[in-house]
Structure formats: C-alpha cells, structure tokens
Image: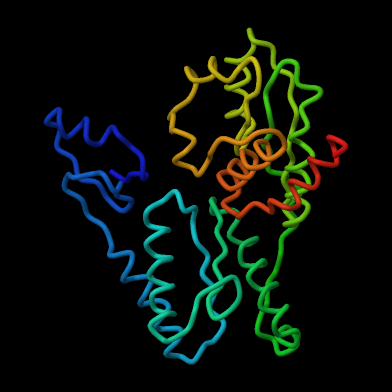
C-alpha cells in the first residue's frame, strides 16, 4: 500500500497481525516492512547528471515538504550542489519551486522559467524554452466558513498573496450556520475546494468531520497576537494549500490596510 507521511493506521494494522508492506511514501516513524527508493541518492544523482553535462541553471520542481520523499529528494539536490562548491538558494545554480498537485506542474515550470529569464533575458530569444499553454478558466477555491463572517478580513491577505504570485485562486468568505456545518463540509469536497479556514462557531465542532487532525505547531505555528497572528496562520494555510512559500509581507500589508493600521 502507498502511504503518506502521517498515517498512523499502518502501525495499528501491523500490531493487529495484518500483513502489509508500505511502498513509496514511508512515514519516518513507521517500523514495518517497506519498499522504497533511496530518495536522497536519487535527488543527488539527478543534480550530478545535470552538473556533469555542464548546466548551470538547475530547476528542481518539488512536491509539498509535508511529504518525506519531497524533503529527501530536495536534500539530495542540495547536497550535490554543495559537493561542487556551490551554494543552493532561490536563484541558480539551484532553484526549487514547490507544487502540491500535479495540475500545478505547468505553473511551477513557468515560474522556474520566469526566474531564469530574469537572470538571462536573451534565453527566450535563443529558443531555450518552448511552451504551449492551453486556456484554463478554472479557478482553484479556498476560503473560510463562519457565522457571523461578513467582517472577517482574511480574504484581503489571501487574495493579495494570490495576485502577488500570479495564481488563479479565489478565497471565498462563506456564511455557514451551525446547523449547516455538516452539509458545508460535504460541499467542500463536492466543489473540490483546496482548503478551508474555520472561524467561530465552528472551530471545535468541525473536528468530527475531519479525516485527520494534526497539532498546529507541527506545521510551524506559534502563539501571536493581533495582525501577526492572522498573517502567520494565513501563511501556514497558504503553504498547505498551494505548496508555495507565502508572501508574508504582502499579506501583512493587505491585512493592516484593511484594519486601517
């Protein structure tokens, strides 16, 4: 069976005496039999191959860092770069673009090309890149459920972040009455929404409808007050939804403006 990084059911199945073999994505705390690639080595070999060919602009399109395979392959890429006496960073010789879903791969490649072109404006004229883009009028949806929710300002920072990164995403502020929460959560799946924030009065009641619960600190959250709290909570959600680093200063500025600060 294929696994994610945080599936506790694997150990429960093994303790129950049910034979199983975990494949591909192996949780770090899983101690049973498994079959997997050496992801660190594979990332290192891929980077070494490109370096041996003489390439100086190396693009690494990664999955979300919540997955062990993405972390290990990225570490292998960085290790190969450092072994050549170089230092990986946000610009070449190694540029990493993270994307959480397959259908964002084209967007990730475009971001990577934009970064390279910004360093070498003539690269397009030389014919290094040829991309055909199909029309896509579908927006990815995220948002917030609450009641009352009309005065919730989180939409301004998320919409500012989407605009900053050129994402065709929309953040919806949705009024959900307490008696309608179960239906709203079903609608979340029906509309294929990428994620949702919960505000009063749903923060506790929603737990019964979740597939998995994880402590916020494990995602990098920590206690803050005021605008900083909203921005950093929003930044964590942004990264979980999109797989991209949140433009925190842009989010903070948008939210502070909404509060008249």
The answer to which quarter of the image holds residue 154 is top right
Name the spot of residue 94 as percent of width and height, x first. 53, 76
Q: Foreground: 229 or 184?
A: 229
Q: Residue at x 69, y 20 (%)?
A: 146
Name the spot of residue 7 as percent of width and height, x first. 33, 37
- Colour mapping used in the image: rainbow
Q: Residue at x 15, y 27 (%)?
A: 16
Q: Left or right? Give the position of 185 relative to 172.
A: left
The answer to which quarter of the image holds residue 155 is top right
Q: How many marks?
A: 0
The answer to which quarter of the image holds residue 229 is top right
Q: Foreground: 174 or 78?
A: 78
Say if 168 sits above or below 47 in the image.
above
Residue extending farthest to the top is 179
Residue extending farthest to the left is 17
Q: Quadrant where the N terminus lies?
A: top left
Name the spot of residue 74 as percent of width and height, x first. 43, 65
Q: Residue at x 49, y 35 (%)?
A: 216
Say if 113 sits above or below 102 in the image.
below
Q: Quadrant where the C terminus lies?
A: top right
Q: Left or right? Give the position of 26 relative to 74.
A: left
Q: Left or right? Give the position of 59 relative to 119.
A: left
């Amino acid at each position: 069976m294929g696994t994610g990084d945080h599936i506790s059911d694997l150990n429960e199945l093994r303790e129950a005496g049910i034979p199983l073999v975990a494949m591909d994505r192996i949780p770090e705390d899983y101690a049973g039999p498994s079959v997997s690639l050496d992801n660190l080595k594979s990332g290192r070999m891929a980077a070494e191959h490109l370096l041996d060919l003489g390439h100086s602009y190396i693009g690494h399109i990664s999955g979300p860092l919540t997955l062990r395979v993405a972390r290990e392959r990225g570490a292998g890429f960085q290790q190969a770069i450092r072994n050549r006496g170089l230092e990986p960073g946000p610009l070449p010789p190694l540029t990493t673009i993270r994307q959480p879903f397959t259908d964002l791969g084209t967007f990730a490649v475009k971001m990577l090309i934009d970064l390279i072109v910004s360093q070498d404006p003539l690269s397009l004229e030389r014919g290094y890149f040829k991309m055909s883009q199909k029309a896509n009028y579908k927006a990815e949806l995220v948002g917030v459920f609450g009641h009352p929710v009309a005065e919730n300002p989180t939409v301004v920072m998320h919409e500012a972040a989407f605009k900053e990164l050129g994402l065709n995403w929309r953040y919806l502020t949705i009024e959900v009455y307490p008696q309608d929460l179960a239906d709203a959560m079903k609608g979340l799946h029906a509309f294929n929404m990428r994620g949702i924030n919960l505000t009063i009065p749903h923060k506790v009641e929603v737990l019964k409808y979740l597939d998995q619960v994880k402590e916020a600190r494990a995602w990098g959250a920590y206690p803050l007050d005021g605008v900083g709290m909203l921005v950093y909570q929003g930044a964590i959600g942004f990264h979980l939804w999109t797989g991209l680093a949140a433009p925190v200063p842009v989010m903070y500025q948008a939210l502070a403006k909404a509060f008249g600060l």
